[in-house]
């Protein structure tokens, strides 16, 4: 937390409502970007909020075998249980509060499916997936995983206890994340009690955005009110961003705050492949079709 006057706070550049769309086997996601209103926010390529939705027995859907190359997918499970399997023989499960930071690099084929038990019983599903671009020199790196269970994610509180933050990447309120990122990124999950506020330092030149998961929030130098399911893109004009929860809220506001150092490289993307040139994208398609990203066995 910093103490700053409003001259040092970033203003709001844009506010975008997420767009409902379907993914995988047909599960509903809310996507603030990329959309018609907002392209990528270098180095971030996509943000999807799955749910929150209450599913009956047998209703849960997932994303069966599909490839990725050239970037990272970061899955943050809020409610529900998912299972992950891939072409390198890796598998794992995601429970509430867990984060999986997958660096696809040169290529993986993976499946992201609801856990069998969760499908059987049904229940509330709520998760977030972020795509982070990789710099040119890392696009063909060996795939790697960082699976961080909820109990290993540092949590910090403001001195008055009205603000809590989970530090998924980067640093906040004196806590540092355990996840290692290829490009400098901050990924924070704030919970603010009604009337609470927090300021977070953002390095000059970094792109910074907030996404409201629950409750309204007040954002930027202007302290503009933004409802849930919206993305706030900050300008690059200050050294910190301010987030607050309206005084008259009846429950805590839940907000994701992301910032990252832009790569400033050309982006050529086609579905699950994000490279620097169209030729590299064509090569990714050919490599996938020839099984060079492997297949899932077992
Ligand atoms: Fe995927």
Image (cartoon, helix red, strand yellow):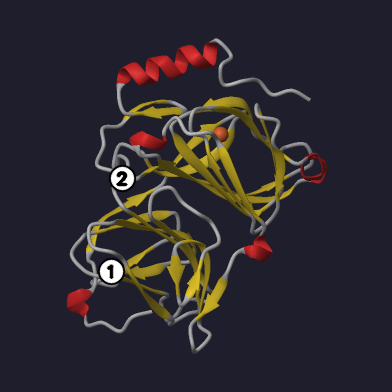
* Ligand 1 shown in quarter: top right
Instruction: Name the residue: 82% across, 41% down.
Output: 120
Can the viewer see residue 196 in this picture?
yes
> Compared to 217, does 14 lie above or below?
above
Q: Which mark is residue 55?
A: none
Q: Is residue 103 left or right of residue 99?
A: left
Tell me if 102 is positioned left or right of 82 in this view: left
Q: Earlier in the sequence, mark 1 or mark 2?
A: 2
Quadrant where the N terminus lies? bottom left
What residue is at 47 percent from the left and 80 percent from the top? 194
Query: Pointer 2: residues within 10 angstroms few (<14), some, or many (20+)?
Result: many
* Residue at (41% x, 37% y) in the render: 138
> Compared with residue 247, is residue 66 higher up or lower down, i.e. above or below?
above
Residue named by callout 2: 42
Give percent across and percent down for residue 197: 40, 79
Beta carbon of the mark 1 residue lies under 8 A of ligand 1: no
Between 238 and 249, the one lying in front of the other is 238
The residue carrying pointer 1 sits among few (fewer than 14), some (14 to 19) or many (20 or more) residues within 10 Å by Cα, namely many
Residue at x-position 21% and y-position 60%:
236
Q: Which residue is mark 1?
A: 220
Closest to the camera, between mark 1 and mark 2, is 2
Q: In the image, residue 37 lies at what x, y percent?
A: 29, 42
Task: Evaluate whether residue 251 shows in this view.
Answer: no
> Disc 1 on helix, strand or loop?
loop
Q: Against 96, is 246 above or below?
A: below
> Residue 2, image x and y in percent?
33, 80
Marks 1,2: beta carbons within 8 A: no
Which residue lies most toward the bottom here? Answer: 160
Position in image of residue 222 (x %, y %): 23, 71
């Amino acid at each position: 937390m910093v103490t700053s006057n409003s001259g040092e706070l970033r203003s709001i550049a844009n506010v975008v409502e997420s767009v409902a769309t379907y993914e995988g086997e047909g599960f509903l996601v809310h996507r603030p970007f990329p959309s018609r209103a907002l392209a990528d926010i270098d180095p971030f390529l996509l943000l999807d909020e799955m749910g929150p939705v209450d599913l009956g027995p047998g209703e849960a859907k997932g994303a069966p075998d599909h490839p990725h190359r050239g970037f990272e997918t970061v899955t943050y499970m809020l409610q529900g249980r998912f299972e992950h399997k891939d072409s390198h023989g890796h598998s794992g499960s995601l429970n509430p509060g867990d984060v999986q930071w997958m660096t696809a690099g040169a290529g993986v084929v993976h499946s992201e499916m609801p856990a069998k038990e969760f499908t059987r019983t049904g229940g509330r599903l709520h998760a977030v997936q972020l795509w982070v671009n990789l710099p040119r020199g890392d696009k063909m790196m060996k795939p790697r995983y960082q699976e961080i269970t909820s109990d290993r994610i540092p949590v910090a509180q403001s001195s008055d206890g009205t603000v809590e933050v989970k530090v998924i990447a980067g640093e906040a309120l004196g806590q540092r994340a355990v996840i290692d990122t290829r490009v400098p990124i901050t990924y924070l999950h704030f919970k603010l009690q009604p009337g609470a506020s927090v300021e977070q330092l953002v390095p000059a030149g970094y792109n910074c955005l907030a996404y409201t998961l629950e409750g309204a929030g007040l954002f930027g130098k202007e302290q503009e009110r933004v409802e849930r399911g919206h993305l706030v893109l900050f300008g690059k004009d200050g050294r910190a961003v301010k987030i607050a929860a309206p005084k008259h809220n009846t429950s805590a506001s839940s907000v994701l705050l992301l910032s990252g150092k832009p790569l400033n490289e050309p982006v050529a993307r086609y579905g699950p492949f994000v490279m620097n040139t169209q030729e590299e994208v064509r090569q990714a398609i050919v490599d996938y079709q020839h099984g060079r990203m492997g297949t899932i066995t077992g």
